[in-house]
Amino acid sequence: MEQTLVILKPSCVLRGLIGEVIGRIEKRGIIITAMKMMQLDEKILREHYAHLVDKPFFPDLCASMMATPVICMVLKGIDIVSVFRTMVGATNGRKAAPGTLRGDLCMSGQANIVHASDSPENAIIEINRFFKPEELTDYVPSDLSFLYANDELNP
């Protein structure tokens, strides 16, 4: 099964939305295999957002991502990267569809409550950036057969 990295950003933490977001993940049937709270620093943010370091808004992005600790999670499921990105919605909450996390819970392009890996390849890189191997589990819920059909699990 595919994995993805999710970060519940300070805008999620400060607004008391951690439980709401995790609840929606669980209700969807997505498997959470790792989770921790951590304080980000500029070093890890420069690595994570390397493609944005030269943008004029990067200092504000860093400041916002260091405002509070964040919740980092690893999610697992079939096609989880695309499934979760669809759940998250457009980057700018004002443009995100109702029913998505951002469409329902935020109004900003930067304070957009959650980060989600954009590809299976980047998910692996991001998971390794934020988690040590010993922090990852291979948890499989006992109700897996009620989340996926047998032919989906064993193609």
Image: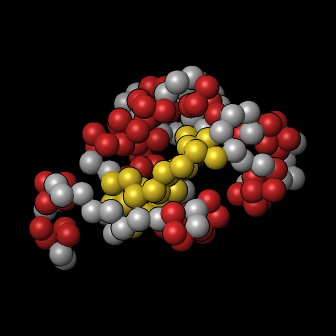
The residue depicted at 73 percent of the width and 33 percent of the height is 67
> Residue 77 location, x and y as percent?
33, 60
Residue 152 in sight: yes
For the residue pair 52 and 145, the one nearer the viewer reads as: 145
> Residue 153 location, x and y as percent?
20, 70
> Residue 112 location, x and y as percent?
59, 34
> Residue 129 location, x and y as percent?
64, 64
Task: Give left or right: position of 38 versus 154.
Answer: right
The residue depicted at 27 percent of the width and 62 percent of the height is 140
The residue depicted at 58 percent of the width and 62 percent of the height is 131
Residue 141: quadrant of the picture: bottom left
Residue furthest to the front in view is: 134
Quarter of the N terminus within the rendering: bottom left
Residue 34: quadrant of the picture: bottom left
* Colour option used: secondary structure
Residue furthest to the bottom in view is: 155
- State how many labels appear: 0
Quarter of the C terminus within the rendering: bottom left
Task: Give left or right: position of 1 versus 6.
Answer: left
Residue 41 sits above or below residue 155 on the image: above
The residue depicted at 64 percent of the width and 46 percent of the height is 38
Residue 110 in sight: no
Task: Give left or right: position of 114 versus 154.
Answer: right
